[in-house]
Amino acid sequence: MKKIFILTALLALLCSCSDFLNIRTEATMPTYGFDYTKTENIIMPLSAAYASMRLGEGESFHYVSVMEIVSDDADKGSSPDDGAPAKQVDEFTLDPANDCVNTVWTYFYNMSSAANYAIESMDKFKESITAEDALKQVEECRGEARIIRAWAYFNLVRIFGSVPIIDKSMTSEELSSAKPASEEQIYKFIYDDLDAAIRTVESSWEEYPGRYTCWTARALKSRVALYRKDWKEAAAQADAIMASDEFSLQPKFRDAFLMKGENSPEILMSIQSSTLGQEAGDAPMCYYAFIQGPRNNPEPFQGWGFNVPSQKLVDFFDARGDADRKAATILVRGTTTPEGDVLTDKCTNPYYNGKVYTPSRYNKWSFNAYGRDYDMRLIRYSEILLNFAEAMANGASFAPASGMTAQTALDAVRARAGLASVSATLDNIYEERHAELAMEEQRFFDLVRWGKAAEVLGPLGFKAGKHEHFPIPTSQRQLNPNLPASPGYTY
């Protein structure tokens, strides 16, 4: 059984205050039954915020639709008549009533709400306790909650564009009249949260692998800075991580995605998941890997079969001679994994996402067990190297403490994949990012921020001026008339 922070803290939550796992979008806070004078309670609201990040079955399906199926790297998968909302996303025929869009909107706002609750709880603890070590814990937990909130708003702004910033508990009347902030205001809000976390959160948690650190905040800020074209900040945050000597690439690319790669020195941010070694019962599981498991394959090596690698991605790897990353990224029908798991010829689709592969020996849950112990990798060290290379190639100017250059950072990523050095031009860095991070929910958003989406995705139905963002959901505009109609869509 994995020993990870959110599980041990979550168990306390489940036993003592289960309502914290169901925080409403309004971020309403309980008015009784919670003692802010007890230092052992400090961790509980933060644990609830971490729990809000885990994806259930339906959320996972909608999440991968918006985050990855929309790209040229992935197809809807499953059977042709299954998952109509994902098919609309895949073909750019979606409208504002699409279930995927509304579910993802709700998912990230619920996450923000849970983080807001944790932050406000820290204010109450600060008013109620005096012990110096407990007050330090309060500020650390506040910082971690701000990382979670920053993650939520980073996704909201890159998916939807201009949205309301909800940074405190509100009544339903206040929520229904909240006005959208500009994208620049949202990015500043994210920066502020991450800067605060960098100052206050621990650099490591030896006792709790998987818990977010100041390095998590720096890693996320490095990525966010690329979207703002804030090249110096993107490079500086990446450089601080590289200079820390706390992180490194796994020796083999595939190892970063296997169970043994969870909470390894390559992982800076993930969403923890576990069955707690059980076959049934309550467990803090994430269904992200399960819904991508091979369809129509024998248990316990099967899932819903959504979000499958496209033939275009297969051809991309082949054209590069990128054998290691292709083998790790793509499971092929009719083959056997190195661990001995067979993808039979009866599988519905020719390819499946190899980056969420979990060997059958781990899949012990009583029904459709696949992937319940898989941790979602959100930020890996290889991305930090590529963030640095891209920012430096775009003209970031400062003296790196790590001693790295765009060229050495790019070379490190390629060498791990068994590839020779190439010049650190922007085009080569873009292509390397595509190969390294394929099927990790980055491709579509990278194409948009690079200004290449219309060129690459146009043949798939993408229309410039419309599809750079997903539409504000119809149901949300009905709840809040201040939310604008998204350009190009009919409501």
Image (spheres, helix red, strand yellow):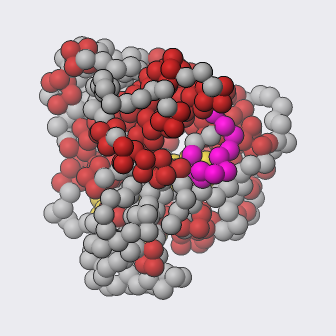
Q: Is residue 217 above or below residue 341?
A: above
User: What span is in magenta?
Assistant: 201-211
Count of numbered circles in the view: 0
In the foreground, 347 or 15: 15
Q: Quadrant of residue 204?
A: top right
Query: At 39% across and 55% down in the image, what residue appears?
Result: 284
**Left or right of 218: which side holds 478?**
left
Query: At 72% across and 55% down in the image, what residue appears?
Result: 248
Determine if residue 113 is in view. yes
Q: Main secondary structure of the magenta part?
A: loop
Q: Is residue 426 above or below residue 416?
A: above
In the foreground, 366 or 393: 366
**Left or right of 206: which side holds 101?**
left
Determine if residue 413 is in view. no
Residue 225 x, y percent position in the rendering: 59, 30
Residue 358 x, y percent position in the rendering: 46, 71
Q: Is residue 192 magenta?
A: no
In the foreground, 91 or 37: 37
Query: At 35% across and 77% down in the image, what residue appears?
Result: 300
Query: At 60% across and 56% down in the image, what residue appears?
Result: 263
Residue 477 x, y percent position in the rendering: 19, 24
Residue 385 x, y percent position in the rendering: 69, 47
Quadrant location of the C terminus in the rendered image: top left
Q: Quadrant of residue 80?
A: bottom left
In the foreground, 58 or 274: 274
Q: Quadrant of residue 193?
A: top right
